Image (cartoon, rainbow, N blue to C red):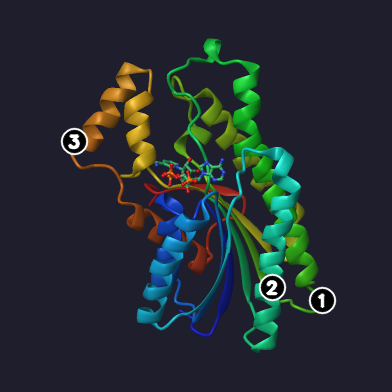
Amino acid sequence: MGLRHHHHLLIITGANRGFGKSIARSYIAHSNVAAISFVLVGRNHDALQGALDELTAQATDSGVALKSIIVGNVDLAKTDALDGNLGRISEAAAKLRSEAIQSDNAIQQSILINNAGSLGNLAKTAKEITWQDTRNYLDFNVVSFVGLCSSFLKDTLAAFPKELHPEHKTTIVNISSLLAVQAFSNWSLYAVGKAARNRFLGVIALEEKANNVKTLSYAPGPLDNEMQADVRRTLGDDEQLQIYDNMHKQGNLVNMDDSSKKLVLLLTKDEYESGSHIDFYDP
Ligand SMILES: NC(=O)c1ccc[n+]([C@@H]2O[C@H](COP(=O)([O-])OP(=O)(O)OC[C@H]3O[C@@H](n4cnc5c(N)ncnc54)[C@H](OP(=O)(O)O)[C@@H]3O)[C@@H](O)[C@H]2O)c1
C-alpha cells in the first residue's frame, strides 16, 4: 500500500474501552501509516489515559509516530454542555494540526469516528417508550452525533481548503448496526438512532463530494464485549434472547479486533462507496 509516509488525524468517541479502543488499536496495527494523531474523546479521563498508555506502547513497538490528546469529561448525553465540548474537541484537533505543520509532517487525512453509543432500554416495546425516553436517547445518539459531524466538517474544510490541499481527504464514520437497515422487536430507539445516523452521512456524502469528503456507516457485527453482555441481560424479546445467548455460548460473537481490522482496511483501501452502509459480514 502507498500510505507508508502518511500522517492521519483521527478523532474517536468512546475511545476508552470496547470497540472504540479496538479501532484505535487496529489503526496503529493495520493502516500502514507512519504517523497518527489521535483525539481520544470520552467521559472518563483516567480510563482514556489507561487506553492511551496501551496505544502508546503499541505504537512504539510498531514504529508508528503517535501524538495524542485526551478530551475527557465529555458526556455526549448532556446537550447543555455540547457546545463547550465540541469547542474542546476542535481545539485539540487544531493543536495537533499546528504541531504537524511545525514538525513538517503534513496531515493527509482527517477522520472522525462516531463510535460512542448506547442501547436504550431493550426491555421496553415501542408502546412502552415515553417521549422523555426518546428525547434522552436521541440527545446522545443523534443530536450530539450531528453536532460532532458538522463541527468536524467545518473545522477540517477550513483547515484544508481544497484549492491549497487538493490531496487532503476528510472521512466521517458512523459505527452503525444491522438495526439501521432491519427492524427487530424491542430495539425501537436504537434502530431509530442508527437509521438516522446512516441517512445523515448519506446526505453529507452528496453535499461534500466535491470537497474530497467521504462517509461510511459500518455495522461491526455482534461483538464479544460489554455491550453484548448488556443485550443478553436486558433484551425483552425471548426469541432474540435465545439467538444472542446461543451465539455467546457457541463462541460465535465477533472478536472486536477482527471487526475493527475490517473497518481499518475498508478505510485505507478507500474503495467503498461514500454514504454507504457496510456490515462486518459483507464479503
Ligand atoms: N457491541 C455490539 O455487539 C455492537 C453491535 C453493533 C454496533 N455496536 C455499536 O458499536 C459502538 C461501540 O459500542 P461498544 O460495543 O464498544 O459498547 P460499550 O462497550 O458499551 O462502549 C460504549 C462506549 O461509549 C461510551 N459512552 C457511553 N455513554 C456515553 C456518553 N453519555 N457520553 C460519551 N461517551 C459515552 C462509553 O464510555 P464509558 O466508559 O464512559 O461508558 C464507551 O466508551 C456503539 O455505537 C454500538 O451501538 C455495538
State the residue in front, 279 or 224: 224
Q: Is residue 67 left or right of residue 146?
A: left
State the residue in front, 163 or 225: 225
Q: Residue at x 65, y 47 (%)?
A: 201
Q: Residue at x 64, y 20 (%)?
A: 132
Disc 2 residue crowd, few under 14, some 14–19, many 20+, Cα 10 Å: few
Above or below, 8 against 139 in this view is: below
Tell me which amino acid carries mark 1.
Answer: Glu
Return the residue at label 1: 163
- Asked if residue 222 shows in the view, the reply is no
Q: Nearer the viewer, mark 3 or mark 1?
A: 3
Return the residue at label 2: 95
Check disc 1 and report its element: helix, strand or loop: loop
Check disc 3 and report its element: helix, strand or loop: helix
Tell me which amino acid carries mark 3.
Answer: Lys
Determine the CA span between mark 2 and mark 3. 46 Å
Determine the CA span between mark 3 and mark 1. 55 Å
Check disc 2 and report its element: helix, strand or loop: helix
Q: Which mark is residue 251?
A: none
Tell me which amino acid carries mark 2.
Answer: Lys
- Asked if residue 148 shows in the view, the reply is yes
